Amino acid sequence: MLPELARPTAPRPVPLTTVGAAVDAESVIGGDGVVVTGVTSDSRRVLPGDLYVAVPGARVHGAQFAEQAREAGAAAVLTDADGSGRVVAAGLPVVVVPHPRATIAPAAAAVYGTATNAPTLFAVTGTNGKTTTTYLVRALLESLGMRAGLSGTVERVVGERSVETRHSGRLTTPEADYLHGLVARMAEDGVEAAAIEVSSHGLDGNRVDELPFEVSIFTNLSQDHLDVYGTMERYFESKMALFRPEHTRRGVIMLDGEWGRRAASEARVPVTTVATAAGPDAEAADWTVRIDHEVIARTDFTLVGPDGVQLRSSIALPGAFTAIDLSLAVVALVESGISLDRIRYALDSSDGLHPSVPGRLDLVSMDSPLRVYVDYGHTEASFRAVLHALRPFTPGRLFMVFGADGDRDRGKRPAMARAASEETDVVIVTDYNPRTEDPASIRATLLETIRTEFPEREVHEVPEPGDGIRLAIELARPGDLVFVGGHGHRADVEVGGRVVPFSARAVAVDALREFGWLDTPASARTPGEADGRTEAGERGSASDAEEDHLARAC
Ligand SMILES: CC(=O)N[C@H]1[C@@H](OP(=O)(O)OP(=O)(O)OC[C@H]2O[C@@H](n3ccc(=O)[nH]c3=O)[C@H](O)[C@@H]2O)O[C@H](CO)[C@@H](O)[C@@H]1O[C@H](C)C(=O)N[C@@H](C)C(=O)N[C@H](CCC(=O)O)C(=O)O
Ligand SMILES: Nc1ncnc2c1ncn2[C@@H]1O[C@H](COP(=O)(O)OP(=O)(O)OP(=O)(O)O)[C@@H](O)[C@H]1O
């Protein structure tokens, strides 16, 4: 059986006492002569020789799984005083610390050696554009002939190998033990640089501690996650933790808007700023982006930097925001020491960047005269950015099929409904990913805003998302465009706490065929196909161990 993707294949044994010193342990019980070769905070991922970090969580104390960890071959456990009794009872050596979650990263760094042996790491944070920008960083690196890695909402990638995030714990920013293991594997595999999505929850939960980011990108900030943070101020502060010397050497910040300006002034590391040339922050910025020409399949732009240096290029995606995301990626690479001339040469050689960003403004079929896009956006700002991008290329009606996340920031729902109503002609409200919430009440909130504030807007309520997508495609006429917001790359949704298979892309392709928009067999792209990679299995998928774990974890 192959090892997991988030583990080095040739781990080195590290004395438990060394780990104890790295985490400033209160005590190490029974650790003499014990060595560990890996670290995990999930008992279901334990491999022989591991240090299992038993974290007191919101739901359970990880020490409950000490026995299970021992049976899987754990060599020792790191936990707090509350958990240590159970570990001793399970017959394992124990390292005791006051706050186990905060010590996952230093323990993993000590075992995997990631503080000194890691690819050049780029972090991307912000409300919208993290996934997109990490894929653009990776595409740029690959266009320079560099071996690249990635970690984010869609997948974790080491060179040609990848594992989907839904099969590796589902978090955008995984736990620190996973990330350090992944970075160690990248280093072992000759990956030269990698892009990592950093969520605010990841920062709060110490998931990116001890990772030596070279450059961190701030894309933007708008309303999201207020169920957790309460105020935008606290949400902002959580993101700003990334821009401190303990996390990153430098920052690249999109200046446009109040939060961008504040991010630039409150960062505690040297920052380089980017702004749109037409915006009010252009004068103050180190780099500006000007949109030269937009067609639906391509956006041309000029990036102007210090001393007038210039890059004229294009991205094969619609929307000014995609050129902005690419500009941030270019500036981050320049800040890491890669010359702009080298980037220009690479982009000129391929006539701009042709990235594949799974589930972000994803055109479902090249062969259909009706354009249907599937997108992962689930905030007002992302709805507006994407719909503005599509509107100029829609001679007919713009349809939007969407719903809102359950168990997440309820306060953003009216603003999402407002954006959908203002920017489109026909709105179809469906369920999206209700999790444990009552889907009818989520729909009711969205519909109330639409019917009260936009009484003229054509609106349909269709609970089942597949039926909603089918209705849009059935009603559409030549010249219309259908935008499905929310599902993006996802292959499932959570309903009543159960994970149910659902692919908006697959439903859309079937509906295009059913209503006569596609005569030929579907040519729907799968994630990665457009950049030459194919299905997970062919491109070097997760190991059996990883898949097994994941099946159980889901
Ligand atoms: C609020 C939050 O972030 N919670 C995370 C946290 O949960 P928790 O503290 O409640 O942990 P717990 O379930 O009590 O378990 C305690 C410990 O026991 C371990 N355990 C548990 C069961 C078992 O059989 N064996 C075992 O070892 C767990 O791995 C954990 O270490 O630690 C868990 C283990 O890593 C995470 O799965 C969980 O994420 C939950 C599921 C979650 O939904 N998080 C979201 C909010 C999140 O982090 N989202 C951001 C993206 C946001 C965005 O931008 O959209 C992300 O980065 O993904
Ligand atoms: N710079 C940007 N500004 C606004 N919207 C953007 C920007 N970049 C991408 N988007 C759009 O925002 C939505 C989310 O994009 P993406 O998944 O890249 O962001 P994210 O930060 O990773 O979000 P999430 O954490 O929810 O996955 C998509 O609709 C995407 O097309």
Image (cartoon, helix red, strand yellow):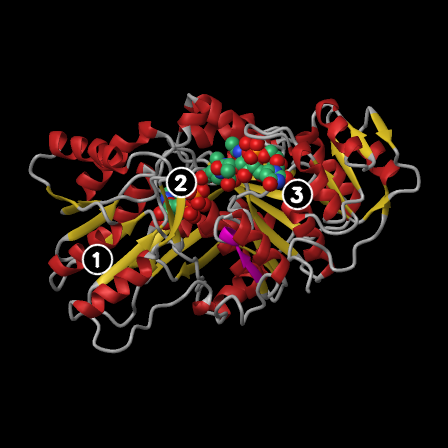
Horizontal arrangement in the rendering, residue 531 relative to residue 516 (left or right): right
Measure the alpha-carbon separation of dots 2 and 1. 39 Å
User: What residue range appears in magenta?
Assistant: 162-167
Q: Is residue 277 visible?
A: no
View extreme (right): residue: 33
- Residue on which disc 1 sits: 393
Residue 191 falls left or right of residue 539: right
Q: Distance between the residues labelled 3 and 1?
A: 51 Å
> Which amino acid, by three-letter code, is at mark 3?
Ser
Please tell me how crowded label 3 is: few (under 14), some (14-19), or many (20+) other residues with Cα within 10 Å.
many
SS at badge 3: helix
Query: Residue at 44% across / 69% down in the picture?
Result: 529
Q: Does the residue labelled 3 lie within 8 Å of ligand 1?
A: yes
* Left or right of residue 348: residue 384: left
Asked whether mark 1 lies closer than 8 Å to ligand 2, one says no
Q: If you read the primary sequence from the N terminus, does the residue marked by circle 2 or circle 1 appear first?
A: 1
